[in-house]
Amino acid sequence: MLSVQALARRIRYRLHDIDEITYEDEEILDSLNNGIRFIRRTIASIRPALLMTEHSGTLAAGIKSITLETRPMKIINVTVGKPEKALHETEMAFAIHRASDKTGEPQEFYLTGSQTINFYPTPKEPTPYTIRTVDDVEELTWQDKSPLLTEFDDFLVEYVTIRLSVGNEYDMTQEMQMLANIAAQIQQIIMPPPAGIITKGYWQ
């Protein structure tokens, strides 16, 4: 979790631009923000639980929607009740096509806008819920720190160095190959372990 200024120094060193002649601060900052999105999308596609935030509460009877405080980049799952039961995701058009005033234990959810979760059918009694998301992040400024682990900051420095140096040479094929290599390295680090296998002994 390095500061933006520390990341910029490392990037300029790798780009042989310590004197700050070739690259503007804003150019480096833009590439850093692009890199964070690239790395977070890579992580979210492989093991989203590493970026997960839980939003929990209780739906009052007759209330069918809640609005999250932050915009989710990805919804991992939505559960209701105790014990928890996972809901199926649907589209608003499908829910409205059926009886929109139906009440009961929620079975499905759908999004309206980027932050509002709607439950169908509408609960007729207080219902606890948990929404697990990968939330969007604010763009960094020069006063901020990276939201990534320090180990992933190494990938961030590599990403920005590639984008700025290769980008100047207009070699998109080489750039894509290098970025794919970064994604593969991230995958090797965060790939979840295989599911456990239980086998019986020879004499059982």
Image (spheres, rainbow, N blue to C red):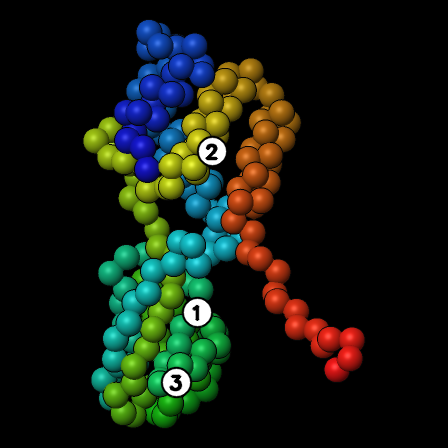
Comes first in the chain, label 2 or label 1: 1
Return the mark for residue 83.
Answer: 3
Callout 3: 10 Å neighbours few (<14), some, many (20+)?
A: few
51, 29: nearer the viewer: 51
Looking at the rendered structure, the secondary structure element under dot 3 is loop
Visible residue check, residue 175: yes
> Total number of numbered labels?
3
**Position in image of residue 65 (x %, y %):** 29, 76
Tell me the amino acid under the disc marked 2.
Answer: Phe
Tell me the amino acid under the disc marked 3.
Answer: Pro
Viewer-side label of 2, 1: 2
Tell me the amino acid under the disc marked 1.
Answer: Asn
Residue highlighted by disc 1 = 77
Residue highlighted by disc 2 = 155
Callout 1: 10 Å neighbours few (<14), some, many (20+)?
A: some
Residue 73, image quadrant? bottom left
Horizontal arrangement in the rendering, residue 28 relative to residue 197 (left or right): left
Looking at the rendered structure, the secondary structure element under dot 1 is strand
Residue 134, image quadrant? bottom left
Return the mark for residue 60.
Answer: none
Residue 143, image quadrant? top left
Would you place residue 150 above or below residue 72 in this image?
Answer: above
Would you place residue 55 above or below residue 120 in this image?
Answer: above
Horizontal arrangement in the rendering, residue 3 relative to residue 41 (left or right): left
* Residue at the (55%, 35%) spot, across then down: 182
Comes first in the chain, label 3 or label 1: 1
Calculate the distance from the C-alpha at mark 2 to the C-alpha at mark 1: 28 Å
Calculate the distance from the C-alpha at mark 3 to the C-alpha at mark 1: 15 Å
